[in-house]
């Protein structure tokens, strides 16, 4: 956990409105866990003032520039351009200086059991699932269910497949994969593999639907949540969600940045979580 | 690289006021630094002039619904709603961590009624590791139709008097800028026995999402902080320094050393850094290093020579 002053290695549009950025990130390989995130800042530039949170898509090594030098550790982010901060990010080029705070937060809890694993991603919500898939695929039968509005929203699926993951795609307009919502596939898969464990990230309405399907069937579920964040380290209390035991007298607010972003679904008060995050529907 | 390096004397950055000895004039602003622990991985808490905690109330407080924050031009709005663990949990769970450091601990607190203010102050007065209290008077008085204590000079005077009676430790009163003339509340605080004044708290503001036509903060109205408010904060600090005899701590939009210097030059004995901690958890360390460099560059041996050196 530290603030790294570093540089962009690559920044490319991989689908209309979606970018993939590779960043030099020494020290990340050793400590970053699937589901963790970084707070990203374009160095010393105003605006935007606050850093923006992004999940870590993957971590890798590049060969050294010349003999005797260490290999170059990098991380990759995949982001969708939605506002002022991501507009600035899309303009970045190789060699541009940025700051990264991280890796932050609690990632996915991964057990050693071999059973079936189902990853459910909605649009850009697939980002934190890649490192998870990478760490599960060699011992578990892992399936990726990925849904989006249209074919442009379905990204990097072939990379998941290269890990040995089976993928199922749905789009709302039917332009890729099956037409409809991804939750329908989830129900189908859980009928077949009722003992599976589910991991999910995506827009709140999708997460809520996934939660209802899983809780009805007593299937263990971990979700990665999004929230507006100012600090990313548990200080501003801007990113809170209500925990299951929450009441006015005994407030149980959980920081998405510190106690999350990954939560076991039973830790959350879903009625209120859903209400709190209505505004994120667009993401 | 040995012989003819000019020896540069480190300038003195220590300041003293209201019975407090601070290694440097720099401390975090309440609510932007958690209870200290959150920032320990990023900076050395022993380098800070003081550690200022999140505001505490008698009982734990849940805070407001989300969204609680929104970015604005050169700043942010927040309506956290003073969520905190309550004074007792603070003493038993958070104080032991803070006591490890030799930086004085300043505890920020508030109440919903005059009695509550007094009660929290009394409890904190008995805690050995607490060096001073900072009283946030930007809270609605629930017994009087929710009028904010700090916007009514009479209510401010009364509540500060109540607290003063129950406190032997130094009392810093933190003023709200949401008044017509801040000199009036500053004088009320001095008359009621405050040992120091800190200012400013956030400026009330509002922002609307034009697509959903909803306020961008669930609480509708929030408090504006960050670099955009700095000129207002500097102006108010200047006015208050000219009005009261007690020492003043400047707060508002400090992002870098030069910003801190503005406050010191108009006469603040120390400054607090708020929103900048969110942007960069190392912010205070950078500001401190740059303050020192500034003094060296300008041939200033003691930061106290800068304080109140405004040329009019
Ligand atoms: C832990 C975490 C991981 C994330 N990972 C990714 C990722 O891998 N890829 C990606 O593209 N995005 C990710 N996000 C969302 C990303 O942080 C926001 O899209 C980004 O901050 C928007 O910044 P902006 O300045 O471009 O937009 P703004 O102008 O700030 O906002 C534009 C729109 O995006 C919404 N928004 C802003 N911030 C957030 C946020 N933090 N969460 C949800 N919605 C937001 C706003 O409500 C608004 O509707 C993640 C968020 C969190 C909390
Ligand atoms: C998220 C947030 C929480 C805050 N919480 C408190 C608080 O609990 N008590 C208090 O007196 N001031 C609180 N403040 C106000 C700050 O201490 C400070 O006065 C204000 O933010 C202006 O300084 P800045 O521009 O450097 O942030 C808070 C500010 C922010 C942004
Ligand atoms: S983002 Fe500040 S507490 Fe989570």
Image: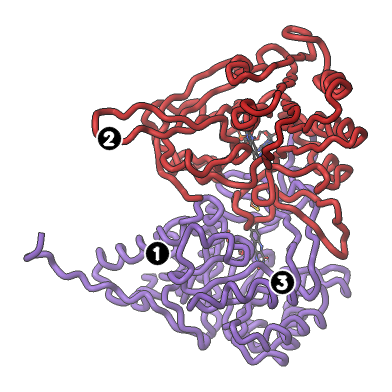
Chain colours: A red, B purple
Label 3 sits on residue: B56
Q: In which quarter of the image is residue A138?
A: top right
Residue A261 in percent (x, y) is at: 68, 43
Horizontal side of residue B197 vs A218, given as left or right: left
Tag 2, which secondary structure?
A: loop
Report the disc number at residue B267. none
First-in-chain label (3 vs 1):
3
Separation of marks 1 and 2 at Cα, in angstroms: 34 Å
- Of circles 1 and 2, which is in front? 2
Separation of marks 3 and 1 at Cα, in angstroms: 27 Å
Q: Mark 1 lies on which chain?
A: B
Separation of marks 3 and 2 at Cα, in angstroms: 52 Å
Residue B167 in percent (x, y) is at: 68, 90
Asked whether the viewer can see residue A82, the reply is no
**Residue found at x 74% / y 15%:** A168
Q: Mark 3 lies on which chain?
A: B
Q: Mark 2: few, some, or many residues within 10 Å (few <14, many ≥20)?
A: few
Which quarter of the figure is the N terminus of chain B placed in? bottom left
Q: Eyeballing the image, is B170 above or below B140?
A: below
Share a chain, discs 1 and 2?
Answer: no
Asked whether the viewer can see residue A267, the reply is yes
Label 1 sits on residue: B288
Label 2 sits on residue: A69
Tag 3, which secondary structure?
A: loop
């Amino acid at each position: 956990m530290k603030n790294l002053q570093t540089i962009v290695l690559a920044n490319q549009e991989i689908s209309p409105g979606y970018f993939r950025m590779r960043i030099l990130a020494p020290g990340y390989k050793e400590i970053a866990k699937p589901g963790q995130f970084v707070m990203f800042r374009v160095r010393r530039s105003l605006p935007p003032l606050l850093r923006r949170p992004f999940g870590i898509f993957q971590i890798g090594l590049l060969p050294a520039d010349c003999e005797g030098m260490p290999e170059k550790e990098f991380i990759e982010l995949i982001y969708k351009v939605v506002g002022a901060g991501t507009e600035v990010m899309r303009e970045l080029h190789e060699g541009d200086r940025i700051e990264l705070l991280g890796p932050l937060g609690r990632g996915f809890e991964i057990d050693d059991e071999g059973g079936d694993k189902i990853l459910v991603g909605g649009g850009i919500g697939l980002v934190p699932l890649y490192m998870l898939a990478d760490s599960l695929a060699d011992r578990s039968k892992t399936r990726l269910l990925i849904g989006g509005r249209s074919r442009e929203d379905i990204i990097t699926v072939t990379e998941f497949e290269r890990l040995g993951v089976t993928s199922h795609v749905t789009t709302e307009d039917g332009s890729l994969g099956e037409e409809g919502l991804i939750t329908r596939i989830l129900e189908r898969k859980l009928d077949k593999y009722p003992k599976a464990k589910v991991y999910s990230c995506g827009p709140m309405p999708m997460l809520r639907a996934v939660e209802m399907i899983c809780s009805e069937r007593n299937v263990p579920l971990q979700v990665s949540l999004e929230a507006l964040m100012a600090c990313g380290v548990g200080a501003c209390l801007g990113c809170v969600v209500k925990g299951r035991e929450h009441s006015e007298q005994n407030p149980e607010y959980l920081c998405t940045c510190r106690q999350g972003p990954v939560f076991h679904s039973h830790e959350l008060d879903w009625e209120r979580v859903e209400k709190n995050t209505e505004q994120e529907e667009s993401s | 690289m040995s012989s003819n390096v000019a020896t540069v004397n480190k300038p003195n950055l220590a300041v003293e006021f209201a019975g407090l000895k601070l290694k440097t004039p720099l401390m975090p602003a309440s609510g932007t630094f958690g209870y200290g622990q959150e920032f320990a991985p990023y900076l050395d808490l022993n380098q800070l002039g003081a550690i200022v905690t999140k505001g505490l109330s008698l009982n734990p407080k849940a805070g407001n619904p989300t969204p609680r924050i929104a970015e604005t031009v050169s700043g942010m709005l927040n309506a956290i709603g003073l969520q905190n663990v309550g004074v007792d949990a603070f003493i038993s769970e958070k104080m032991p961590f803070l006591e490890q450091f030799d930086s004085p601990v300043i505890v920020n607190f508030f109440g919903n009624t005059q009695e509550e203010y007094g009660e929290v102050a009394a409890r904190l007065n008995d805690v050995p590791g607490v060096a001073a209290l900072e009283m946030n008077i930007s809270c609605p008085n629930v017994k009087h139709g929710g009028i904010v204590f700090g916007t009514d000079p009479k209510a401010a005077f009364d509540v500060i008097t109540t607290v003063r009676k129950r406190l032997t430790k130094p009392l810093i009163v933190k003023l709200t800028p949401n008044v017509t003339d801040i000199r009036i509340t500053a004088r009320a605080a001095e008359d009621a026995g405050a040992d120091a004044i800190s200012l400013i708290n956030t400026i009330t503001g509002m922002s609307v999402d034009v697509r959903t036509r909803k306020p961008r903060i669930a609480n509708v109205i929030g408090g504006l902080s960050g670099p955009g408010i700095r000129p207002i904060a500097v102006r108010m600090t200047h006015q208050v320094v000219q009005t009261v005899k007690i020492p003043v701590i400047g707060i508002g939009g400090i992002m870098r050393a030069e910003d801190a210097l503005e406050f010191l030059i108009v006469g603040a004995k120390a400054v607090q850094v708020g929103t900048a901690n969110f942007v960069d958890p190392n912010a205070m360390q950078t500001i401190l290093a740059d303050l020192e460099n500034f003094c060296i560059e300008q041939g200033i041996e003691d930061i106290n020579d800068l304080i109140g050196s405004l040329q009019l």
